[in-house]
Image (spheres, coloured by chain):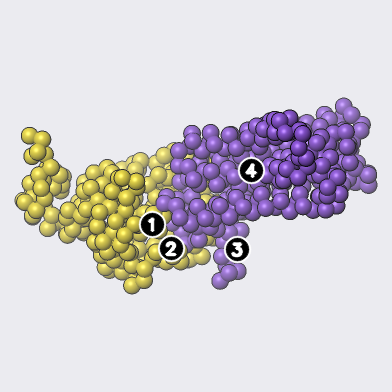
Chain colours: A yellow, B purple
Amino acid sequence: MISINNLHKAFGKNKVLQGIDLSFEGAGITAILGPNGSGKTTLIKCILGMVYPDKGDIQLGGQSIRHEWAYRDQLDYLPQIARFPENLTVLELFSLVKDLRKRTASGEELVELFGLKPFLNKRLSNLSGGTRQKVNIVQAMMFDSPLVIMDEPTAGLDPVAMIRLKEIIRREKERGKTILITTHLMNFVEEVADDVVFILEGKIHFKGSLSALKAQYGEAQLEQAIAHILEGKDPKIPNRFSSIC
Amino acid sequence: MSYQTETIMNKILKYSFFDLVRSRWIYIYCAFYLLFTFSLLWLSSDLSKVVISLMNVMLVLVPLIASMFSIMYFYNSREFTELLLAQPLKRSHIFIGQYLGVAGSLSLSLIIGISIPFLLYGIIGSAEIWNYFTLVIIGIFLSFIFSAIAFFIALRHENRIKGFGLTILVWLFFAVIYDGFFLLGLVFFNEYPLENFTLAASFFNPIDLSRILILLKLDISALMGFTGAVFRKLLGSGLGMSLAYLSLALWVIIPIWGIRRVALRKDF
C-alpha cells in the first residue's frame, strides 16, 4: 500500500537519507531499526509529509503524496515525544483529535485498557511521562486507519502498559493493518515484529523477515545480528573500522 | 470542500484559544489592564487624559506582550504542532488557526481589561465613547500585527534563542529605535521639505501609525508631534484615518501571508 522510491534528503550538508527504496504491503509489523541519527525519524516524517524529500517519491495506494494532505486520513501516527497543549484535559485532547479526523473512533476501549479513566479530566501538564505516553498511544490508535506509524512507542511505559501495547499492536495486525515501528528495544522487536528494516547512514542495509536476519548472520539473538551489521561483518558492507585499525 | 476546510481552521483556532484562555498569563495580562485602567479613571476625571495615558502604555506594552506571548506559545506547542501536522489537515490552516487563536485570546483579554472599568465609569452615552473605541481597535490591531510577526519569526527560526532575540529586536526597533532614527533624520535634514518623507515613514511603523490614529481621533494638536501635524495637514482627518487603518490592515495581512508561505515550504 505504500512504496518509497529512491528517497533523498539532506539538511544542509548532512545527508540524512541517501536513496531509500522500500515498500510495505498488506498486514504486517515492520520494525525500522538503526542507530541514533541514521535517518529513521526523517524517513517517517517524509511519509507523514512533515519533511519534503529532495529527490524521490512516496506513493500511498498508487498516488504520490507530495504536497498532499488528505491522504493522512489513511494513517495513524504516534509521535516520539508526548507533549500536548498543557492546559487541555485528556478528554479534551481526545475530542480535539476526533474532531479533526472526522473518523469513527474507539477510544473508550483503549482508555479502559491503559487504565486512563481517572486521568480523563486532568490537565495534560499534570500527567507523568508514562501516563502521557499512554495518552499518546490512545490518541494515535483510536482510529481505524490501514497504516499505523509508531515512533518509539515504548518510551516511559511501565511493564503492564508494555504488555498492553504489545496486545494492541498484535490485534491491529490481525485486523489487516500495516504497522511501522521504530524502537531501540530489541526484545520488543523480537516479540512483535515480522519484518525488520535496518537503516544506517541513510541507506538500507537489511530488509527482510526477522528470522532471515538472524539466519543471515548465524545468530540466535537479534542484538547480535544487529551488532554484526554495525561491525560490517557482512561482505556486502564495507568494514567501516578497518581503515582505523 | 472549502466549507469543510474552513471549519477545520476554526477548530484549531478554537482549541488554541481554549488552551490559552486557561493559561495563567492571559489572566495576569487582563488583570494588569483592569487595575491600570481602574486606577487611571480613579486618579483623573478627564477621560481624554485617561485615554492618552492608556494609549502611551498600550503602544509599548501590547506589541511587547503580543510578540513574547506568541513566540513562547509557538515554541512551546511544537510537539503538538507536529501532532497536528500528522493529521489530515492543510499546513496553512494549522498555523493560521493557531495564530488566530493566540492573537484572538490576547485581544480578548485586552478588551475585557479595558472595557470593564470604562463601562462601570459610564462610557456609554458619554462623548468619549469613540475615543475609547479607537483605543480598543488599535489594541486589537497591534496584537494581531505583532503576534503575526512573532509567528513568522518563530517559523523561520528553529533556534529559540535566535527567535526570541529577533522578536525583541523587532519590538525594540518599532517601539524605540525607529523614532530615534526618525528624529535624527529630521534634525539632519531640517533644511529640506520633509512632509512627504515623514508621512511615508510613519506608514512603515505600526506603532507610530497607531499613535497618529488615536491622536487624530482625540484631536489634541499639542500632543500630535510633527508626524501627526503633517498627517493632519496633508490628509485631513477623514482620509488620513482611513489610510492609516488601511495600512494597519496591510501590516496584519503581509505577515500572515509570510506565515503561509514559510509554513508551506518548511521541514518539521
- Residue A67 got which mark? 2
- Residues under labels 4 and 1: Cα distance? 29 Å
Q: Amino acid at mark 1?
A: Tyr
Q: Amino acid at mark 3?
A: Thr
What kind of element bears circle 3?
A: helix
Q: Are marks 4 and 2 in contact (CB under 8 Å)?
A: no
Q: Chain of mark 3?
A: B
Q: Amino acid at mark 2?
A: His
- Residues under labels 2 and 3: Cα distance? 21 Å
Q: Are marks 1 and 3 in contact (CB under 8 Å)?
A: no
- Residue A52 got which mark? 1
Q: Are marks 2 and 1 in contact (CB under 8 Å)?
A: yes
Coordinates of residue A135 in the picture (x, y in percent): 44, 48
N-terminal label among 3 and 4: 3
Q: Quadrant of the N terminus of chain A?
A: bottom left
Coordinates of residue A98 in the picture (x, y in percent): 51, 59
Q: Residue at x 27, y 42 (%)?
A: A36
- Residue B146 got which mark? 4
- Residues under labels 4 and 2: Cα distance? 29 Å
- Disc 2: CA contacts within 10 A as few (<14), some (14-19) or many (>=20): few
What kind of element bears circle 4?
A: helix
Q: Are marks 2 and 3 in contact (CB under 8 Å)?
A: no
Q: Nearer the viewer, residue B87 or A211?
A: B87
Q: Residue at x 55, y 58 (%)?
A: B93
- Residues under labels 1 and 3: Cα distance? 26 Å
Question: Which residue corresponds to mark 3?
Answer: B7
Q: Are marks 3 and 4 in contact (CB under 8 Å)?
A: no
Q: Chain of mark 2?
A: A
What kind of element bears circle 1?
A: loop
Please determine if labels 1 and 3 lie on a single subunit.
no
N-terminal label among 2 and 1: 1
Please determine if labels 3 and 4 lie on a single subunit.
yes
